[in-house]
């Protein structure tokens, strides 16, 4: 995932009616981008300038997190292999699944295969935000499973604590910090909605503080900031690639066999188990766990419910002490804004600024291709809006630019299931908030594969799936029109119009 945020935003996209038990009145993720009394947009409405484009012209076209030293590539699978469990996908979900499988049963033979390199997908292309939320923000969770949110919030905080414990015990140097996160309001109207969010957070065990204009700008100085909500618990930041590499070391120390550059080319029942075929080999196993994120899956239930949405990110060169003095940001909180098309931004451990979001690009047919990781139009817009937010940094250069595919589903958080008569389980659809939730999701996937019944597998959260997206070409057309209406709402005082209001009532969404 490319992003993590305090709360959910986005538009609503549907293909069918909503389940009758959803409180769709709370599933409205739009926020006004201009005040009720002004048509003036927050962001520039002119094309990016040549200066904006020059700011990233020499940036490395790769994720900042992947640009540092990495372990040697693990050898690909060559020939047949056997295991008790084969995990498909070498991101955070797949690694947590492999680790927990061995921790639960040290005798269980586990093989993990990754199509290219570990963390090459969403786990290495996100913003490094790590949240306790399992439901993409408490408001989204209350709208969908209100009776289960007290338990899910507790489990989410426990899950985050376990991740921190693992990082500490294994001495994983992943630049973990826990400063909380601030949701930024640009207008009086947006700010007026934040007290309710604060109250919900506090009712569910979080600490949160409202910041007026003066207080917010004392934390982070931007002329655009009107106010905000600082969630002080359940929000962390990491270097996601360092975390992934550390978890891979842990997995191997537990006996997991990892093969990189090993793409799954087939999945089929085989005797009492399954066989996963690859270009140069195969793994015969009692069961398989799919952690394929936004990449095409052999399971129809995943393909119909996940759309890969591309998101883009810039990272600056390191700021000077004088530049940091002009901004503040001494507490290093993660930040995101409240618009339909939102940004997320944070400080890195070496004092750069990561700035991403806004665009959510879907390609016809759900294709995920290497060429899509670079998009000049998105980078130019990001640069322009960065300098609007921080005019005191005019002249700074960006060192890295990249995109990533988010496994978006219509409920905005992971869903689960089994296939091939229970021999295959999956955990996918994190919709941009998977760095923390991936550990929990991996455990749920293992529970389903192993036939375990517990308080989590009995939840509607686990048993129910999001409504599928429509097939092509309706899927592409609907997504594009919804994006158009979201942009119109941002430019029209947040007025959602007939289309978005109709989709709100149906209770389904499109988000990144």
Image (cartoon, rainbow, N blue to C red):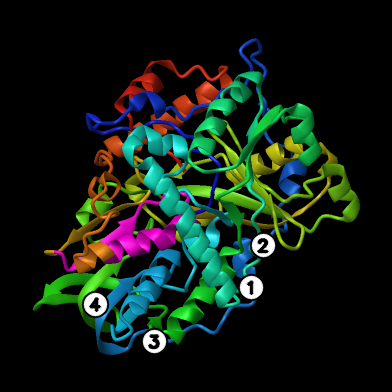
Q: Percent x, y for residue 160? A: 50, 58
Magenta region, residue range: 422-446
The answer to which quarter of the image holds residue 33 is top right
Q: Percent x, y for residue 208? A: 61, 38
Label 1, secondary structure: give it.
loop
Residue 510 appears in the figure: no
Residue sitting at x 26%, y 71%: 265
Q: Percent x, y for residue 1? A: 49, 54
Label 3, secondary structure: give it.
loop
Q: Nearer the viewer, mark 2 or mark 3?
A: 3
Q: Nearer the viewer, mark 1 or mark 4?
A: 1
Q: Nearer the viewer, mark 3 or mark 4?
A: 3
User: Does label 3 or label 1 sit earlier along the sequence?
Assistant: 1
Left or right of 95 in this view: 189: right
The residue indicated by pointer 3 is 255
Q: Nearer the viewer, mark 4 or mark 2?
A: 4
The residue indicated by pointer 4 is 277
Q: CA distance from mark 2 to mark 3?
A: 36 Å
The answer to which quarter of the image holds residue 394 is top right
């Amino acid at each position: 995932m490319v992003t993590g945020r305090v709360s959910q935003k986005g538009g609503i996209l549907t293909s069918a009616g909503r389940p009758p038990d959803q409180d769709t009145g709370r599933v409205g993720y739009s926020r006004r981008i201009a005040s009720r009394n002004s048509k003036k947009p927050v962001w520039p409405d002119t094309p990016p300038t040549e200066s904006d484009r020059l700011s990233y012209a020499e940036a490395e076209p790769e994720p900042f997190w992947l640009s540092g030293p990495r372990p040697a590539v693990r050898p690909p699978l060559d020939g047949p292999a056997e295991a008790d469990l084969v995990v498909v996908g070498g991101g955070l979900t797949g690694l947590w699944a492999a680790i927990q499988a061995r921790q639960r049963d040290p005798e269980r033979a586990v093989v993990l295969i990754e199509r290219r390199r570990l963390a090459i997908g969403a786990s290495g292309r996100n913003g490094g935000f790590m949240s306790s939320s399992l439901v993409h923000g408490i408001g989204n969770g209350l709208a969908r499973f209100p009776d289960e949110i007290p338990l899910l919030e507790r489990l989410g905080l426990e899950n985050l604590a376990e991740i921190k414990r693992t990082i500490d015990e294994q001495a994983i140097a992943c630049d973990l910090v826990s400063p909380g996160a601030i949701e930024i309001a640009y207008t009086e109207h947006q700010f007026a909605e934040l007290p309710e969010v604060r109250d919900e957070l506090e009712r569910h065990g979080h600490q949160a503080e409202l910041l007026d204009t003066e207080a917010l700008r004392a934390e982070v100085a931007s002329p655009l900031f009107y106010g905000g909500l600082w969630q002080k618990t359940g929000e962390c930041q990491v270097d996601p690639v360092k975390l992934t590499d550390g978890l891979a070391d842990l997995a191997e120390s537990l006996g997991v066999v990892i093969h990189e550059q090993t793409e799954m080319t087939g999945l089929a029942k085989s005797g009492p188990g399954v066989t996963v075929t690859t270009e140069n080999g195969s793994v015969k196993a009692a069961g398989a766990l799919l952690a394929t994120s936004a990449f095409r899956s052999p399971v129809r239930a995943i393909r119909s419910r996940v759309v890969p949405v591309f998101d883009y990110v810039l990272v600056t060169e390191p700021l000077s002490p004088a530049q940091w003095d002009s901004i503040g940001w001494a507490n290093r909180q993660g930040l995101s804004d409240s618009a339909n098309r939102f940004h997320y931004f944070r400080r890195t451990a070496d004092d750069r600024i990561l700035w991403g979001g806004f665009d959510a690009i879907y390609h016809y047919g759900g294709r995920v291709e290497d060429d899509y990781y670079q998009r000049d139009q998105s980078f130019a817009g990001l640069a322009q809006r960065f300098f609007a937010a921080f005019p005191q940094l005019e002249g700074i250069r960006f060192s890295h630019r990249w995109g990533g595919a988010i496994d978006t589903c219509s409920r905005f958080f992971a869903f689960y299931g089994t296939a091939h008569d229970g021999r295959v389980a999956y955990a996918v659809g994190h919709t941009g908030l998977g760095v923390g939730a991936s550990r929990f999701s991996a455990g749920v996937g293992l529970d389903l594969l192993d036939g375990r019944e517990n308080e989590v597998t009995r939840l509607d959260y686990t048993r129910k799936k999001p409504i599928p997206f429509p097939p092509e070409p309706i899927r592409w057309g609907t997504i594009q029109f919804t994006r158009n209406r979201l942009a119109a709402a941002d430019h029209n005082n947040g007025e959602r119009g007939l289309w978005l209001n109709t989709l709100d009532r149906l209770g389904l969404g499109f988000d990144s």
